[in-house]
Amino acid sequence: MLTTIRDLFRFSPSFRFGSLILIVVAAFVLLSAFSPYEEDRLRRKVKRNQPPSADFVFGTTSQGQDVFWSLTFAIRNTLIISGIAVFIGRGIGVTLGMISGYLGGIFDRAAQSIVESVIVVPRLPLLILIGSILRGSLTMFTLGILIGILDWAYPSKRYRAQVLSLRERDFTHTAVFSGMGSFKIVLREHLPFIIPFLLADVISGFLFSIGIEVTLSYLGLANLDSPTIGTMIYWGNYYQSIPAGRPWVMVVPMVTAILMVLGFYLMSVGLGEYLDPRKRLVRLTAHAGEEAEDDDPRKEKDDVWAP
C-alpha cells in the first residue's frame, strides 16, 4: 500500500495536486473541533454583514454567523454524508458483485436482473421526489443512507466483471482443488485484486455524493438546520446575499464545493492512470532504467576516480 501511494505521488501530478487540495479540506475538518461556537448555535454570535477581514477571514452573514467557522462544520458534515453513502453503496456493490460473479448460475441471473432494474431508475429525480416527500425529516444520516441505497448498482457490475475474469485464473482453480470454500476464495484470493479498483471507485462515490448533497440542500430538500456546503449556498441565496452586496456568503461555499470536487476528481484521474496497464508498463520501464543506472559498474568506476 505504501509503495502504491509513493508511486502515485511520484508519477501522477494530478494525484499530487488532488491530494494537496484534500489535505487542506481535511485541515478544515480538524479545525471544526476547535470552533469557539457550537454547531447548532452559530447564529447571532458575531457582527452581521461584515466583509472578509483580519477578524473575520471569510466575513459574516446577515444572521450573525462567522462564515469561516460555519464552513468548517459544513465541510465536515458534507463529508460525513458522503462517507455514509460510499460505505453503504460500495459495501453492497462489492459484496453482491463479487459473490454474483463467482457463483454464477441462477443466483447471478437473479442478481443481475435486480441490478439492471435499479440501473434504469433515474437517481437524481427519484432523490428529489423522496426529498420532497420527506422534507424536514431528511437528516444527514438518512440522506447518506438514501444516497448509498441508490448508488450500488453500477459498482456491482464493475466488480462482477473483475471476478468473472479472476475465477478463470489458475490460482482460483488451485484454491478450489485445495478444498477452499467459495466465500473464502472470494475474500482471500479475489478481494486483494479488487482493492485498487475499489479505491478509485470510492473516490468516484465521494464525487457523486457531494454533488447530490449540494443539489438536494440547495433545493431545500435536506435538513436546513445542519450546516453543509449545500445549506450554506441555500441560505446565501435565500437571503439574497449577492444582490445585497455580500457575495462572500455564497462565493465561499461555492468555491469550496468546486475545490472538493476537483480534488477528488484529480485523485480519481491519478488512480485511473496508475491502474492503466499501458501507464504501468511505462512506470516499470522507468524503474528498470533507474535500477540499471544505479547498478552500472562504469558509474561506480567514474565515482572512484572522480577528483
Image (tube, rainbow, N blue to C red):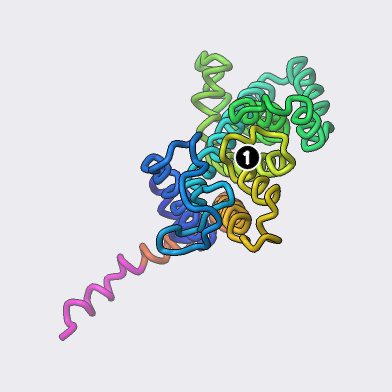
In this view of the protein, which residue sits in the foreground, 289 or 256?
A: 256
- Does the magenta run of residues contain 270? no
Q: Residue furthest bottom?
A: 307
Q: Quadrant of the C terminus?
A: bottom left
Residue corresponding to mark 1: 205
Q: Residue at x 53, y 38 (%)?
A: 77
x, y percent for residue 100? 69, 22
- Quadrant housing residue 94: top right
Q: Residue at x 37, y 65 (%)?
A: 292
Q: Residue at x 30, y 65 (%)?
A: 295
- The amino acid beneath tag 1 is Gly
For residue 145, above or below residue 275 = above
Main secondary structure of the magenta stretch: helix
Determine whether, in the image, residue 213 is placed left or right of residue 256: right
x, y percent for residue 304? 17, 77
Q: Quadrant of the N terminus?
A: top left
x, y percent for residue 230? 64, 44
Q: Is residue 103 visible?
A: yes
In this view of the protein, which residue sits in the foreground, 180 or 108?
A: 108
- Quadrant housing residue 246: bottom right
- Magenta span of residues: 293-307
In this view of the protein, which residue sits in the foreground, 74 or 246?
A: 246
- Does the magenta run of residues contain 303? yes
x, y percent for residue 187? 52, 24
Q: Secondary structure at mark 1?
A: helix
Q: Is residue 161 visible?
A: no
In this view of the protein, which residue sits in the foreground, 286 or 256?
A: 256
